Structure formats: structure tokens, C-alpha cells
Image (cartoon, helix red, strand yellow):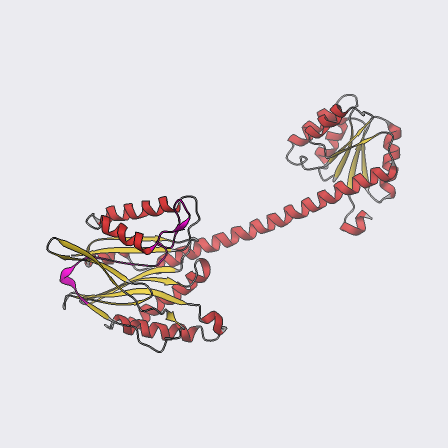
Amino acid sequence: MAENKYNKQFKVLVVDDNVTNIQVVGNILKQANFAVGFAMNGQQALDILYKTPDFDLVLLDIDMPILNGFDTIKIIRLDERLKDIPVIFLTAHHDSEKIVEGFDLGAQDYLTKPFNTKELMARVHTHLQLKYTSDELKHMYSALESKNNNITNSINYANYIQHAMLPNVALLNDMFSDYFIINKPKDNISGDFYWFQKIGHCFYIAAADCTGHGVPGAMMSMLGLSRLNYILNNQIKAPNVILNELRSFIKESLHSIDNDIASYNGIDISLCLINTETKTLEFSGAYNSLLYFKKEGAQTELIEIEADRMPVGAHPKDNMDFTNHELDLTNIHSFYIASDGYYSQLGGEKTKVFTKKRYRNLLFEHHEKTMSDQHQVIEQQFSEWQGEEEQTDDVLLMGMKLK
């Protein structure tokens, strides 16, 4: 029965110093088509198990010469190859303390002598079923662990590729006296990305947030990064023109997938153009706004230039151009662009989102500090707010002070 059900012949080791008991139990098991091994004491049993550790079950007498059942199971449970073999004690004892001691040492069950054939086979089948299921689960776990390791290695390599595609941060030294970039993926690889490029007297800088995070978000980010470089192609264009062209590309690229899915895939982005010749900063945004500090005498004001309430992607308003805003650089002390990941983080005493208001207050409180110090404070605040909560989303935040 066991062979037909599980497609294998189970092996059982019977250990008893009574020859009659061995013969009786052995015949019962053989009639049920089990492969049976025999040992007259614990030491013989261990010798057999060391040579052939693939037994599926051990029926172990307690009172034996040389090495009794309790000492034998102690050794079995210490051996890495043998420790998971189920053991059923065969005992003439009806003493509950002896039975409890056997369970404490690692036995799965016990049978009292003389044996009832039906009870013996019921116990044997039960523990073989449990072992078979346990072995199958271990095999499945091992296979899943191997697949997980392969996936993890692939994601780690994808992370390397993604970072290689990001622009060289050293380019920011040409434009800004001080800056920081906080880039914290939720899942190793990120749907957020930063982008910048210099063409003559013009410097472009963007913070983007693609739909999703992890692998789907990273794939969208690669799409966005490569297309931004293609659109610009060493030509000076207004930020809203770039976003219009990027939107057309994203829509065209995703046109073949289900409309409901396509409508939820896109990029939120803050895109700035700094023109050192005209002393202006142009901004265009899809959901993600621009924050900057304006200084007039002793007064400092934090101003938000709101982005358009539509993504770079399919949307009911996707026939409308993105708005282009132009600002005078002379009054801009510093500016910040970001994804929504920072102020969307869950945490705090009541497990609520950080909120954009708290984020703005944090920037205002520390804006006079160096960007390096701001970076440290902002990261520390995020960590303290997050506490034991999982990171909610990818986080991207950039702060810049102009030369």
C-alpha cells in the first residue's frame, strides 16, 4: 500500500534484543511490502544507520544490552544525517514517566508489547506519511531557496546595471555649490531615478517616480532614463516640451497592453532647466512639484511651484501640454525636487504617513545648514519616523544650492 501511494518502498529498521519480536514485526512489515533491516541492540543499529542512513523509520526497543534505546536515540538525534528519522519505541513499560522520557529524547511515538498488528501498522503508516510529507516540503523549500537565490542574484545584477545607467553625480559640481541626493529603493532596485545633463549654458536636472517599485518600477525607470537622453539629443528644449515628448513615447510603448493596465503606468517627474546665460530656472512637473527657498533681505520664504495633476503617461488630460514655469535665479537660495516616497512613509506613534506638510516644515527648519548636514538630518528623521515599519515606497530626494 505504501509503495503504491508514494511510489517508493519504505525502509524500516527493527531494533530488539528478542529474536521472536524481531521475527514477528519483520514478517508483518514484509507482508506490507516494506524493506526491513534488523539489529539486536543499539550499537548494531547505529552501525547499520551509519552505513545506510536512508532508513525511513526506526522501531526501537528500550531495554537492550550494550546500548539501550534511550542512549541510542540520544546519539541518533545528534547526528546530522540521522536526526530526522522518526523513531517509535517498542516497550513493555506502562510507566508514564518512561514514556514521557522517550518523547523528551525525541521519539515520535511508542508501542507497548505484545503488539497488535493493526495498531502497529497504523502507527507505522502515520509516521511514514508524516516523514514523506516532511521530506517533500524540505525538497520544495530547497528548490524555492535555490530559485530565490537565483532571483536575488539577478536583482543584484539589475541593481548594478541600474546604477551604471544613472548619470555621474560629479556633473553636479559644475552647477551647484552644495547638494545632496537621497536615493533609497524599497526593494534593492528602484522605480525612482534621477537624471541630469549639461548642454552649453543649460543644465537639466530631474527627479522621477515610475509606477510601482522593484522589478516593474525598475523596468519603467530604464525606459524613462534612456528616452530622456534620446529626446534631448544635445538640443536645448523647454522642460514641458521634453515631458510632452516623453509622454507620447510612454503611451506608444505601452499601447499594446490592456488599457486598464496602461492607464496606471507612467512617470511622475520634476524637471528643471537652469540657464546660466539668462539666469533663469524653468520647471515642468507631472504630479511632483518644485520647492525652493526665496530670500529677500532677512526674509526667507519656502515656495512651491505645483506640478500638473497628470502623469507622463495615459490620462484623461493627456491631450493637454504640460505647463512650463520660469523663475528668476537671483532670488533662489536653494531648491528641492523629490518623489512622494519620503512623505508617504508610514510610521510615528500612530502609524500614519509622514505628510507633505511635515516634510516642508523639516526643510524649512534646516534649510540654512549645509546640504551635507541637511542630508544627515533628513535621513535620520526618516529612519526615526519609519521605526519598525517596512519602507512604504522608493524614496528619492534631491537638494541643491546654486553657485
| Viewer-closest of 179 and 362 | 362
User: Going by the picture, which residue comes out furthest to the front?
Assistant: 350
| Viewer-closest of 17 and 202 | 202
Residue 183 placement, left or right of 129: left
Q: Which residue is rendered at x = 87% and y = 38% of the image?
A: 117
Q: How many marks?
A: 0
357 within the magenta span = no
Residue 402 placement, left or right of 386: left
Residue 363 placement, left or right of 354: left
Q: Which residue is rendered at x = 85% and y = 32% of the image?
A: 22
- Give the quadrant of the C terminus: bottom left
User: Going by the picture, which residue comes out furthest to the left?
Assistant: 297
Q: Position of residue 248 (x, y in %)?
A: 37, 75
Q: Position of residue 80 (x, y in %)?
A: 63, 35
Question: Relative to 226, does residue 294 appear above or below in the rendering?
Answer: above
Residue 233 visible? The answer is no
Question: Relative to 337, does residue 21 appear above or below in the rendering?
Answer: above
Residue 107 visible? The answer is yes
Q: Position of residue 374 (x, y in %)?
A: 25, 48
User: Going by the picture, which residue comes out furthest to the top?
Assistant: 66
339 within the magenta span = yes
Residue 44, located in which quarter of the rendered image?
top right
| Viewer-closest of 110 and 224 | 110
Q: Which residues are magenta?
A: 327-355
User: Going by the picture, which residue comes out furthest to the bottom?
Assistant: 319
